[in-house]
Each structure stands twice: as structure tokens, then as C-alpha cells.
Amino acid sequence: MNGEVLEVHEVRKLVHTRLKMKVPSLVEALNGRLRLHHRKMIRRHWDHLQYLESEMQTLEAEIEELVQPYMKEIELLDTIPGVSTDAAASIVAELGTDMSPFPSEAHLASWVGVCPANHESAVKKK
């Protein structure tokens, strides 16, 4: 992006094993034929990627702040094998903490869509 050109001796220090024999062709491939236009496009993509990463960090901080009142529930859900902290936060966000609308665990499983079912039509099973 900044117009740097790699030199053979710089790359040779970074590679190991059989790749050392291919350093000249590796340097040629890495340097390539980037024109100013290509460098500008790469810079735009890089800047956009940096922006997205900063937005993700901001969003994660907001989520962390919003789930603080439900940390006890999230920690309990996190003890279930296969449920991470992020998944537990999603479960709390979807279902809430009040389970009174669901008369039983079967009703909850059905509402979530993880209830086993048998879909059969004639001889076809789906």
C-alpha cells in the first residue's frame, strides 16, 4: 500500500526449509505489478476493514454493557456443555429470563425449534 518493495535478502531471513530455494520467485510474486491505482484500492479496502473492526469492538462493548444485569443467568447457561458465553447471551436475549410463558421444557423446546419431529409423507421421510 505504501509503495514498499521487498528485497531478496529481507525475505530470505523470514523463510525456512525448502522455501529458501524459491525466494527469488517469491519476492517477484509478492512485489507483483501494483500500480498506483491498485495501491489506492488496497488502501481503501484496508481502511474499510479497520473501520469495520472498530465498529465491531464498539458493538461488543455495548453488548457487554447491556448483558451485565443478566450475568448470573449467562454464567449458569455457560455451564451447559457446548454453550459459550456469547451463545448464552444470545439465549437470554431471545428468551429472556422469565420462563413462565412456557408450561414445560417441551413447550420451550418446541418454541425454540429444537423439538424432535417426524415429517413423513407416503414413504418419504424428511
Image (cartoon, helix red, strand yellow):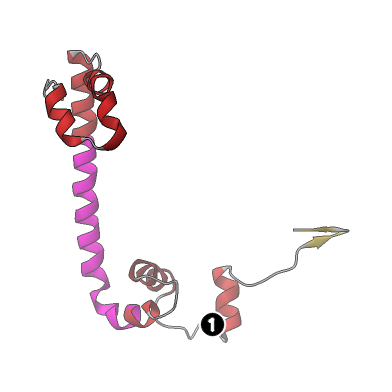
Q: Quadrant of residue 23?
A: top left
Q: Is residue 110 left or right of residue 95?
A: right
Percent x, y for residue 75? 32, 80
Residue drawn at x 18%, y 36% is 14
Residue 6 visible? The answer is no
Look at the image and tell me in which quarter the C terminus lies: bottom right
Whether residue 15 is visible = yes
Q: Determine crowd level at label 1: few under 14, some 14-19, many 20+ residues with C-alpha closer than 10 A.
A: few
- Location of residue 17 by image quarter: top left
Percent position of residue 59, x then y = 24, 56
| Residue 14 shown in magenta | no
Apparent side of residue 11 relative to residue 95 in the rendered image (left or right): left
Q: Disc 1 designates what residue? A: 102
* Residue drawn at the location 40% of the way across and 76% of the way down: 96
Determine the residue positioned at 12% across, 20% down.
3
48 lies above or below 26: below
The N terminus is located in which quarter?
top left
Q: Nearer the viewer, residue 43 or 52?
A: 43
In the depicted structure, whether residue 24 falls above or below residue 85: above
In the rendered image, residue 10, in percent from the top left (x then y), is placed at 12, 28
Identify which amino acid the numbered label 1 is placed on.
Phe
Q: Where is residue 25 shown, x and y percent of the image? A: 28, 19
Q: Dominant secondary structure of the magenta stretch? A: helix
**Front one among 122 and 103:** 122
Task: Please give the range of residues in magenta.
Answer: 48-74
